Image (cartoon, grey):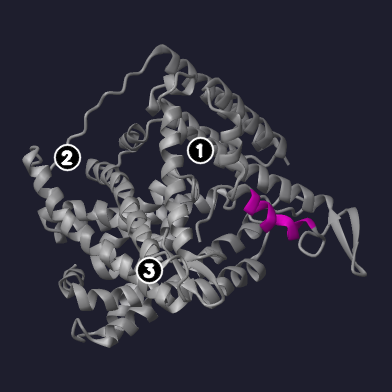
Amino acid sequence: MHIPDGYLGPETCGVFYAVMLPIWVRASKIVKKTLKAKQVPILAIGAAFNFVIMMFNVPIPGGTTGHAVGGTLVAILLGPWAASIATTIALLVQALLFGDGGITTFGANCFNMAFVLPFVGYYIYKAISRNAPIGSNKRVIAAGIGSYVGINIAAAFAGLELGIQPLLHKTATGQALYCPYGLNVALPAMLGGHLLAFGWVEVIATALVIKYLQKRSPELLEEGRKN
Amino acid sequence: MLRDNNFVERSIAGTVSLLKESVFADEYAAKDGFLQSLDPRIKVVTFIMFMAAILFTKSTAVCLYLYALCLALAFFSNVNMGFFLKRTWIFIPIFSFFIAIPALFSTFTPGENLFIINLLGRKLIITSQGLYTVTLLVMRVIASVSFVVLLNITTKHFALLKVLRIFWIPQIFVMTIGMSYRYIYLFLEIVENTYLAIKSRVGTRLDYKKGQHVTAWNISFLWQRSYYLSEAVYSAMLSRGYTGEPVLLDDFKTKLRDWVWLFLTLTFFVILLYANAKLI
């Protein structure tokens, strides 16, 4: 879902930086208030955890593997605002030091993966699980549904951002200057892969991790609920 | 995101190669060369100008010139060209090329016919407009990726993260990014060791359901360790004098050559923007 440099035009890149700026400011204010002093390193550790989740290959039927993004999982564990900061940092490290993602498209990538994905996933999880006990199966199902919807809505936004490029940027003779495919191609291409495959990888990783934490360390899920 | 291989082998190979490549990359930052001699702050600002020029240009020729400039900078910075080309071309640009292939054809990009390919009785027409679109996209991607990779291999990673301060990013974020970067290495080692332990006990072949449970257990175990580690890290920070406000040492020095480089790049950038406004 990482959009590399070169796929989005300058206006789109600028708009998403402008959209993310107040989100980052609000996230840092909220996190400063809610995280206890001794939890300061948890943001850095959360970001590193988020980065490493993307390296876990989850086996799926047919002998293939896929990797999760982990946005909803980190939001359940840290709260959505802290997850937003942690994912932003993970994306920044990926873009700057590992050349994965983009610098000019960083704002758009953060909007999709550090804002839409954790917030949609987390609030769906919260709406379904409501006051269910920490060890309840309802929470596992809620986490699965939240992660599936979250990643698909984020993918739809990525498809939209790519698909509007031929409308926004073209030469006088109509040639596309950035992503060459319109909404009729970009949107189904992004959504198809996520609805059929990557979304399920996200469900498996998120739901099973919540199930394991319920058994082994339910107090960590409690911490996430407080944030 | 999907890979056709055994997940245990894949995870181990992936983490080890990533680690090795990153350590290798820091070796270039320690070498003597043109980019290594620049103040990282000036270097980042000028590289952002190059990236912006690539983003704004409507010309494949300008992208090509900028890419040539990037290769020249790599050469004068003592970067091994084989390593640099492999690191920049593999994956994102090649992936972009494959994604862009359909845009060559008249179905997606109508225009003047350039080539006609007969495939299983169907005529596929490559248009000159399609060729322009695909060339521009791939050139833009490869030039952008090359500048980012060149910046990161010729700058010590910790210095690169400290530079973020010049963009008014609060110190707490800069400190968090620096800490997070170190934890990534620690976590990768934990994951690698865990997978090696799994491999030594059960071999590499597991059915996918068992494999899913192993992966989920691994992620949850990593989170448990991470969470409890954060408290120990905070205690270590307190013992070293952390008072709630992070303090970062400023050891950057700007020399005459940095200002000359900044002036030249700025002039180049303004000329490019002016030329771009006149184009098409």
Q: Write the residue at 28% across / 87% down.
A: A138
B139 is within the stretch colored magenta = no
The subunit carrying tag 1 is B
State the residue position of label 1.
B149
State the residue position of label 3.
B215
The kind of residue tagged 3 is Thr
Q: Nearer the viewer, mark 1 or mark 2?
A: 1
Q: Write the residue at 52% across / 25% down.
A: B266
On residue B246, the disc is: 2
The kind of residue tagged 1 is Val
Secondary structure type for disc 2? loop
User: First in sequence: mark 2 or mark 3?
Assistant: 3
Query: Is residue B195 among the parts visible in the rendering?
Result: yes
Q: Which residues are magenta?
A: B94-104
Q: Is residue B97 left or right of residue B227?
A: right
Furthest-top residue in this view:
B256
Say if B32 sits above or below A158 in the image.
Answer: above
Q: State the count of labels.
A: 3
The kind of residue tagged 2 is Pro
